[in-house]
Amino acid sequence: MNDVTPPEVGEERSVLIVDDDRPFLQRLARAMEARGFAVATAETVAEGLARVEAGAPAYAVVDMRLGDGTGLDVISALKKHRPGARAIVLTGYGNIATAVTAVKLGAVDYLAKPADADDVVAALFATGDHKPIPPENPMSADRVRWEHIQRVYELCGRNVSETARRLSMHRRTLQRILAKRAPR
């Protein structure tokens, strides 16, 4: 049993979901509406900031990496407009440094994609003294490695030679890894 405190009856259940993956955004929005939330969505940092300016929600679920910047800007603005808001960060490119930054800016949790609506709701309502339960289907070590390589590759501007140098990997080995599909 995890330590989750659902909001009281009558407590505002507005949530802003910011993600540039439209199918994921729509699925999560429908799932959150089914759980009683008033959902607002945005696909960019600019849209997310505009939604916060128009009326800061009680909760937010924000993708870390968006086409026009970082979701941390949305969390920072949300905390400025509504200090009591609870926000979580979702990302496919998790690392310790960004998790620490997200928490320092006011995020209450940091979840790896793909996260389902139950995980999101549990993270939003979790109390500060809980220890998260282990995920039912965690990413395999091969998948974590692949995600890390993809992240470094993107940060290097999709330059194979530079990525290989930074990962201390032979360029041809990296090319073979990049050519394969993501492991499960």
Image: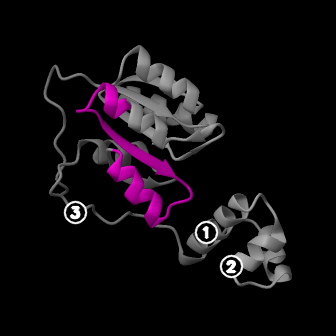
At 79% across and 60% down in the image, what residue appears? 158
Q: Which residue is mark 3?
A: 131
Residue 148 numbered mark, or none: 1
What element does badge 2 sit on? Answer: loop
Instruction: Name the residue tied to disc 2.
Output: 167
Quadrant of residue 168 in the image?
bottom right
Quarter containing the N terminus: bottom left
Query: Does residue 33 lie above or below 119 as drawn?
Result: above
| Labelled disc at residue 107 | none
The answer to whether 44 is drawn above or below residue 147 in the figure is above
Mark earlier in primary sequence (3, 1): 3
Image position, residue 20 (x, y; %): 61, 37
Q: Amino acid at mark 2?
A: Leu
Residue 32, position in %: x, y? 39, 32
Which mark sits nearer the N-terminus, 1 or 2? Answer: 1
- Residue at the image position 64 percent from the left and 62 percent from the top: 151
- Do we see residue 76 in this rendering? yes
Query: For the residues marked 3 and 1, what is the alpha-carbon distance in whole angstroms?
Result: 25 Å
Q: Looking at the image, is mark 2 or mark 3 nearer the viewer? A: 2
Q: Is residue 137 visible?
A: no
**Disc count in the image?**
3
Residue 55 belongs to the span the image colors magenta:
no
Q: Earlier in the sequence, mark 2 or mark 3?
A: 3
Q: Is residue 74 left or right of residue 65?
A: left
Q: Which residues are magenta?
A: 78-105
